[in-house]
Image (cartoon, rainbow, N blue to C red):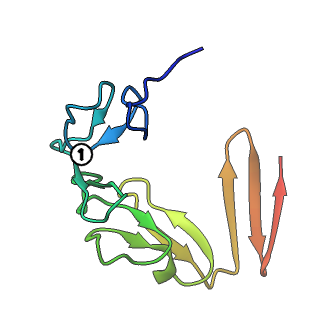
Amino acid sequence: MPTSTFPSTGGAPVDGPFVTSTTDATLSAERVLTDTASVTWDFSVAGQAKATSTSGAPTDATFITQTSNSGLSAEQALASLSTGIAKVTTTTGVISTVVGVASAVIVFPGVVTLTFTDGVLTGAA
């Protein structure tokens, strides 16, 4: 069973695994949080250490989102599509909507064939 050393004046053990913002000569096992190229630490609020990532996914990459996002510049928001069956163009990856189609056949080789006729979608293996 691990033991801890308490200061003679009382208080927290000096050899406990504390997380600190700077080194402390009175502690023997503290872990100091330091900024890196991708993470910065904010200690402005007492009793709190807030990590902020300075890197992440590129904001100009193509993302598919449910709704548009002002932090992205090249996303395709599904909310901008009209209601219908989603279609992906394989050469570009662009998603569009199939609407106003009286009939269509969608084949998933070896899995199922979906047939859309007069607003009814049916499937057969």
Above or below: residue 50 compared with residue 83: above
Q: Position of residue 23 (x, y in %)?
A: 20, 36
The structure residue drawn at horizontal position 25% and vertical position 32%, both measured from the top left corner, is 26
Q: Position of residue 81 (x, y in %)?
A: 50, 80
Furthest residue to the front?
Answer: 9
120 left or right, relative to 11: right
Crowd around label 1: few <14 · some 14–19 · many ≥20 (10 Å):
some
Furthest residue to the top?
Answer: 1
The structure residue drawn at horizontal position 28% and vertical position 52%, both measured from the top left corner, is 56
Q: Who is closer to the viewer here, 30 or 73?
A: 30
Q: Who is closer to the viewer here, 5 or 108?
A: 5
The structure residue drawn at horizontal position 38% and vertical position 31%, both measured from the top left corner, is 7
52 left or right, relative to 118: left
Quadrant of residue 111 in the image? top right
Which residue type does callout 1 highlight?
Ser
Task: Quadrant for the N terminus, please.
Answer: top right
Number of numbered tags placed on the structure image: 1
Quadrant of residue 5 in the image? top left
Q: Position of residue 117 (x, y in %)?
A: 78, 75
Instruction: Determine whether the residue tagged by mark 1 lies in a helix, strand or loop.
Output: loop
The residue identified by callout 1 is: 21
Quadrant of residue 2 in the image? top right
Above or below: residue 56 compared with residue 75: above
Q: Who is closer to the viewer here, 62 or 1?
A: 1
Q: Who is closer to the viewer here, 121 or 57?
A: 57
Q: Position of residue 119 (x, y in %)?
A: 77, 80
The structure residue drawn at horizontal position 30% and vertical position 65%, both measured from the top left corner, is 45
